[in-house]
Amino acid sequence: MRDFLTASFLLQLVTACGGTLAFAVLFKVRAKHLPFAGACGVLAYILYYTVVFFGGSLFTAAFASTAAAAVFSECCARLRRAPAPVFLVPGTIPIVPGSDLYYTMRYLLSGDLPDCTHHLVCAVLVGLGIGGGIVTVSLIFGLLLGHKHEIKHK
Protein backbone atom coordinates (compact mmCIF):
# COMPACT_ATOMS: atom_id res chain seq x y z
CA MET A 1 0.00 0.00 0.00
CA ARG A 2 1.13 3.49 -0.77
CA ASP A 3 2.20 5.88 1.97
CA PHE A 4 -0.16 8.72 2.75
CA LEU A 5 2.32 11.27 4.06
CA THR A 6 5.03 11.63 1.45
CA ALA A 7 7.37 14.42 0.49
CA SER A 8 5.26 14.89 -2.63
CA PHE A 9 2.10 15.39 -0.55
CA LEU A 10 3.84 17.90 1.71
CA LEU A 11 5.05 19.80 -1.35
CA GLN A 12 1.49 19.77 -2.70
CA LEU A 13 0.27 21.23 0.61
CA VAL A 14 2.81 24.03 0.43
CA THR A 15 1.84 24.85 -3.15
CA ALA A 16 -1.87 24.65 -2.27
CA CYS A 17 -1.32 27.19 0.49
CA GLY A 18 0.84 29.39 -1.74
CA GLY A 19 -1.67 29.27 -4.59
CA THR A 20 -4.51 30.07 -2.25
CA LEU A 21 -2.65 33.03 -0.79
CA ALA A 22 -1.66 34.27 -4.24
CA PHE A 23 -5.28 34.24 -5.39
CA ALA A 24 -6.38 35.86 -2.13
CA VAL A 25 -3.94 38.71 -2.78
CA LEU A 26 -5.11 38.89 -6.41
CA PHE A 27 -8.72 39.17 -5.18
CA LYS A 28 -7.65 41.94 -2.76
CA VAL A 29 -8.39 40.05 0.45
CA ARG A 30 -7.27 42.13 3.43
CA ALA A 31 -3.98 41.12 5.01
CA LYS A 32 -5.65 40.28 8.33
CA HIS A 33 -7.77 37.61 6.58
CA LEU A 34 -4.95 36.02 4.55
CA PRO A 35 -3.96 33.35 7.12
CA PHE A 36 -7.57 32.14 7.30
CA ALA A 37 -7.93 32.08 3.53
CA GLY A 38 -4.69 30.09 3.31
CA ALA A 39 -5.92 27.67 5.98
CA CYS A 40 -9.14 27.20 4.03
CA GLY A 41 -7.18 26.21 0.93
CA VAL A 42 -4.99 23.79 2.87
CA LEU A 43 -8.02 22.23 4.57
CA ALA A 44 -9.78 21.80 1.22
CA TYR A 45 -6.73 20.21 -0.39
CA ILE A 46 -6.05 17.84 2.52
CA LEU A 47 -9.61 16.56 2.39
CA TYR A 48 -9.58 16.29 -1.42
CA TYR A 49 -6.30 14.36 -1.37
CA THR A 50 -7.50 12.09 1.45
CA VAL A 51 -10.74 11.13 -0.29
CA VAL A 52 -8.96 10.41 -3.59
CA PHE A 53 -6.15 8.54 -1.80
CA PHE A 54 -8.62 6.17 -0.16
CA GLY A 55 -10.45 5.45 -3.40
CA GLY A 56 -13.20 8.05 -3.48
CA SER A 57 -14.45 9.46 -6.77
CA LEU A 58 -13.43 12.88 -8.06
CA PHE A 59 -16.98 14.15 -7.49
CA THR A 60 -17.03 12.90 -3.90
CA ALA A 61 -13.60 14.36 -3.18
CA ALA A 62 -14.51 17.74 -4.66
CA PHE A 63 -17.91 17.81 -2.93
CA ALA A 64 -16.53 16.86 0.51
CA SER A 65 -13.53 19.17 0.36
CA THR A 66 -15.53 22.12 -0.91
CA ALA A 67 -18.27 21.55 1.67
CA ALA A 68 -15.63 21.53 4.41
CA ALA A 69 -14.10 24.71 2.99
CA ALA A 70 -17.55 26.31 2.87
CA VAL A 71 -18.25 25.43 6.51
CA PHE A 72 -14.81 26.74 7.48
CA SER A 73 -15.50 29.94 5.49
CA GLU A 74 -18.89 30.45 7.13
CA CYS A 75 -17.33 30.04 10.56
CA CYS A 76 -14.47 32.39 9.70
CA ALA A 77 -16.98 34.91 8.34
CA ARG A 78 -18.70 35.05 11.70
CA LEU A 79 -15.50 35.11 13.73
CA ARG A 80 -13.67 37.61 11.52
CA ARG A 81 -16.74 39.73 10.63
CA ALA A 82 -16.17 39.39 6.90
CA PRO A 83 -18.18 37.88 4.05
CA ALA A 84 -17.75 34.13 3.61
CA PRO A 85 -16.57 34.41 -0.04
CA VAL A 86 -13.47 36.24 1.22
CA PHE A 87 -12.30 32.86 2.52
CA LEU A 88 -14.19 30.48 0.24
CA VAL A 89 -13.22 31.75 -3.21
CA PRO A 90 -9.45 31.56 -2.65
CA GLY A 91 -9.92 28.41 -0.53
CA THR A 92 -11.37 26.43 -3.41
CA ILE A 93 -8.55 27.29 -5.82
CA PRO A 94 -6.52 24.13 -5.02
CA ILE A 95 -9.52 22.01 -6.04
CA VAL A 96 -10.17 23.67 -9.42
CA PRO A 97 -9.45 21.11 -12.19
CA GLY A 98 -7.00 23.23 -14.14
CA SER A 99 -4.90 20.38 -15.47
CA ASP A 100 -7.97 18.47 -16.68
CA LEU A 101 -9.18 21.56 -18.53
CA TYR A 102 -5.74 22.02 -20.07
CA TYR A 103 -5.52 18.40 -21.22
CA THR A 104 -9.08 18.52 -22.54
CA MET A 105 -8.11 21.34 -24.88
CA ARG A 106 -4.74 19.78 -25.72
CA TYR A 107 -6.28 16.46 -26.76
CA LEU A 108 -9.16 18.16 -28.55
CA LEU A 109 -6.75 20.17 -30.67
CA SER A 110 -4.59 17.12 -31.40
CA GLY A 111 -7.65 15.09 -32.38
CA ASP A 112 -7.36 12.53 -29.58
CA LEU A 113 -11.07 12.36 -28.70
CA PRO A 114 -10.96 9.47 -26.18
CA ASP A 115 -8.41 11.26 -23.98
CA CYS A 116 -10.20 14.57 -24.53
CA THR A 117 -13.47 13.03 -23.35
CA HIS A 118 -11.81 11.43 -20.32
CA HIS A 119 -10.33 14.74 -19.10
CA LEU A 120 -13.54 16.62 -19.88
CA VAL A 121 -15.57 14.20 -17.76
CA CYS A 122 -13.05 14.53 -14.91
CA ALA A 123 -13.21 18.34 -15.09
CA VAL A 124 -17.02 18.35 -15.15
CA LEU A 125 -17.24 15.95 -12.19
CA VAL A 126 -14.91 18.11 -10.10
CA GLY A 127 -16.76 21.26 -11.15
CA LEU A 128 -20.10 19.75 -10.17
CA GLY A 129 -18.63 18.65 -6.84
CA ILE A 130 -17.36 22.16 -6.14
CA GLY A 131 -20.69 23.73 -7.01
CA GLY A 132 -22.65 21.13 -5.07
CA GLY A 133 -20.53 21.55 -1.95
CA ILE A 134 -20.89 25.32 -1.96
CA VAL A 135 -24.64 25.28 -2.64
CA THR A 136 -25.37 22.62 -0.02
CA VAL A 137 -23.52 24.38 2.78
CA SER A 138 -24.86 27.80 1.77
CA LEU A 139 -28.43 26.48 1.84
CA ILE A 140 -27.96 24.85 5.23
CA PHE A 141 -26.41 27.96 6.77
CA GLY A 142 -29.04 30.15 5.12
CA LEU A 143 -31.87 28.05 6.49
CA LEU A 144 -30.38 27.84 9.97
CA LEU A 145 -29.46 31.48 10.25
CA GLY A 146 -32.57 32.70 8.45
CA HIS A 147 -34.77 30.78 10.88
CA LYS A 148 -32.79 32.15 13.83
CA HIS A 149 -33.14 35.66 12.42
CA GLU A 150 -36.93 35.31 12.11
CA ILE A 151 -37.32 34.08 15.69
CA LYS A 152 -35.16 36.89 17.01
CA HIS A 153 -37.30 39.63 15.44
CA LYS A 154 -40.75 38.39 16.51
Image (cartoon, rainbow, N blue to C red):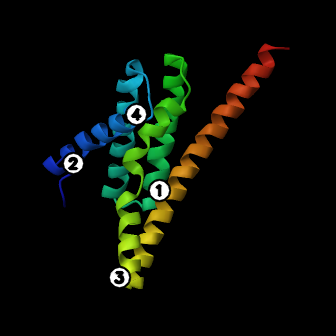
Against 51, is 80 above or below?
A: above
**Amino acid under label 2?**
Phe
- SS assignment at label 3: helix
Nearer to us in this view, 73 or 4: 73
- Where residue 98 appears, as percent x and y from the top left, is 38, 58
* Quadrant the N terminus occupies: bottom left
Residue to which mark 2 is pinned: 9
Task: Nearest to the eye among marks 3 and 1: give it.
Answer: 3
Q: Nearer the viewer, mark 2 or mark 3?
A: 3
Tell me, for residue 60, which label it has, or none: 1
Q: Residue at x 53, y 24 (%)?
A: 77
Mark 3–mark 1 Cα distance, whole angstroms, equals 30 Å
| Amino acid type, mark 4 | Ala
Task: Mark 3: give few (<14), some (14-19) or many (20+) Cα within 10 Å.
Answer: few
Residue bearing the label numbered 3: 110
Q: Amino acid at mark 1?
A: Thr
Within 10 angstroms of label 2, few (less than 14), some, or many (20 or more) residues? some
Which residue is pictured at 35% across the width and 70% down the height?
A: 103
Q: In the picture provided, is 68 more to the left or to the right than 110?
A: right
Q: Residue furthest left?
A: 7
SS class of the residue under badge 4?
Answer: helix
